[in-house]
Amino acid sequence: MADKLAKGLDLAQREGPVSAYRALGGGGRFKVRYLAAGFFTKLLYFGGYDTKPLLGRPLIYDSNVVAALNKWTNDTWKVDGPAEMYSRYLDLAADWASEAGTDADVVERALFGR
């Protein structure tokens, strides 16, 4: 298990958070049984947030964030959704952060608290 998580984090640092999400989620090559996105995205966030900002910064995608996204957008968001959904979330958080003059993780924290 630790080896898969380390490989997922390394992938986030080399290729970006969406690639790592794809590898750690669903049927991905580094999937850890019973480890949901709400947990492995915390690993990506804390282990890879400042690694390569140009590749995008990983954000936490858990049930609290999903509930807020479903409340505040017209899209349908799912816990443990596909990598494309996570990518959409990262883009949306980056857009909202830019409009508010802050960082995307501040947006994530606001969504978490809603």
Image (cartoon, rainbow, N blue to C red):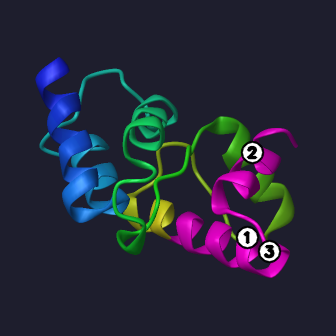
- In this rendering, the answer to whether 68 lies above or below 56 is above
6 displayed left or right of 110 = left
**Residues in magenta, as a range:** 88-114
**Res. 27 visible in picture:** no
Give the residue number, with chain letter if any, for mark 2.
109
Looking at the picture, how far across and down is residue 62, in whole percent?
60, 38
Tell me the mark number nearer the camera, choosing from 3 and 1. 3
Residue at (80%, 81%) from the top-left corner?
Answer: 99
Q: Is residue 31 magenta?
A: no
Q: Amino acid at mark 3?
A: Gly
Give the mark, 1 or 2, whose residue is nearer the N terminus.
1
Looking at the picture, how far across and down is residue 73, in whole percent?
79, 69
Q: Amino acid at mark 2?
A: Arg
Residue at (74%, 53%) from the top-left corner?
Answer: 106
Q: CA distance from mark 3 to mark 2?
A: 15 Å
- In this rendering, the answer to whether 1 lies above or below 50 is above
- Which element carries disc 1, helix, strand or loop? helix
- Which element carries disc 3, helix, strand or loop? loop
Give the residue number, with chain letter if any, for mark 3.
101
Looking at the picture, how far across and down is residue 30, in whole percent?
16, 38
Give the residue number, with chain letter if any, for mark 1.
97
Q: CA distance from mark 1 to mark 2?
A: 11 Å
Quarter holding the N terminus is top left
Q: Amino acid at mark 1?
A: Ala
- Check if mark 3's residue and mark 2's residue have beta carbons within 8 Å: no
Tell me the mark number nearer the camera, choosing from 3 and 2. 3
Within 10 Å of the Cα at label 3, are there few (<14), some (14-19), or many (20+) other Cα atoms?
few
109 displayed left or right of 14 = right
Residue at (84%, 74%) from the top-left corner?
Answer: 100
